[in-house]
């Protein structure tokens, strides 16, 4: 009967350690994804267009609800690394030409 008590105590300790590590990892992930959503250019979001507001939407969702940080990690961060996506034509500023004289 003593062996059951030791096994149960070890299992409870392992579960407690796992919960503590999980509790420490979530705020770190939240801050990391919030910073990434603010720094990332609009055209670096998957499926973005010239009129989309993906950056604003993700930043607000992550800042106020916090659980979308996990969704952001899998839907945006893991799919498209910053600086690795080619800039589309619509992301360049239009060139101003002087009026013809």
Image (cartoon, rainbow, N blue to C red):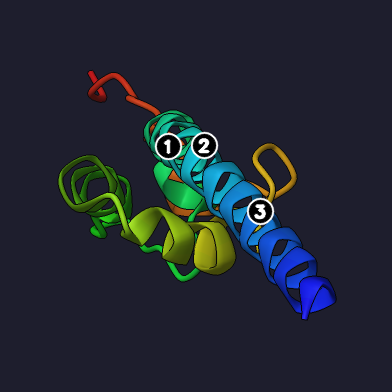
In this image, 62 relative to 31: left or right?
left
Q: Nearer the viewer, residue 19 or 6?
A: 6
Identify the residue position indicated by label 2 in the image: 24
3D distance between C-alphas at marks 2 and 1: 6 Å
- Measured as percent of width and height from the top left, residue 82 is found at 65, 40
Q: Is residue 13 left or right of residue 61?
A: right
Which marked residue is nearer to the observer: mark 2 or mark 3? 3
In the picture of the structure, the residue carrying the numbered disc 1 is 27
Using the image, determine if residue 75 lies above or below residue 24: below
Residue at image coords 44%, 66%: 71
The quarter holding residue 101 reads: top left
Residue 98 as seen in the image, left or right of residue 10: left
Q: Residues within 10 Å of mark 2 (few under 14, many from 20)?
A: few
Residue 27 location, x and y as percent? 42, 37
Residue under the point 40% across and 45% down: 42
Residue on which the image places disc 3: 13
* Mark closer to the chain start, 2 or 3: 3
Q: Secondary structure at mark 2?
A: helix
Q: Position of residue 84 (x, y in %)?
A: 75, 45
Sequence-earlier tag: 1 or 3? 3
Please identify the quadrant where the N terminus is shown. bottom right
């Amino acid at each position: 009967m003593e062996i059951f008590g030791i096994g149960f105590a070890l299992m409870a300790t392992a579960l407690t350690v796992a919960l503590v590590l999980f509790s420490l990892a979530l705020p770190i992930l939240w801050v990391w994804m919030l910073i990434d959503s603010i720094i990332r250019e609009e055209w670096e979001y998957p499926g973005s267009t010239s009129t989309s507001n993906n950056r604003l939407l993700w930043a607000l969702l992550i800042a106020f609800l916090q659980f979308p940080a996990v969704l952001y990690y899998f839907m945006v961060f893991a799919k498209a690394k910053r600086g690795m996506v080619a800039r589309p034509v619509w992301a360049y500023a239009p060139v101003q030409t002087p009026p013809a004289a």
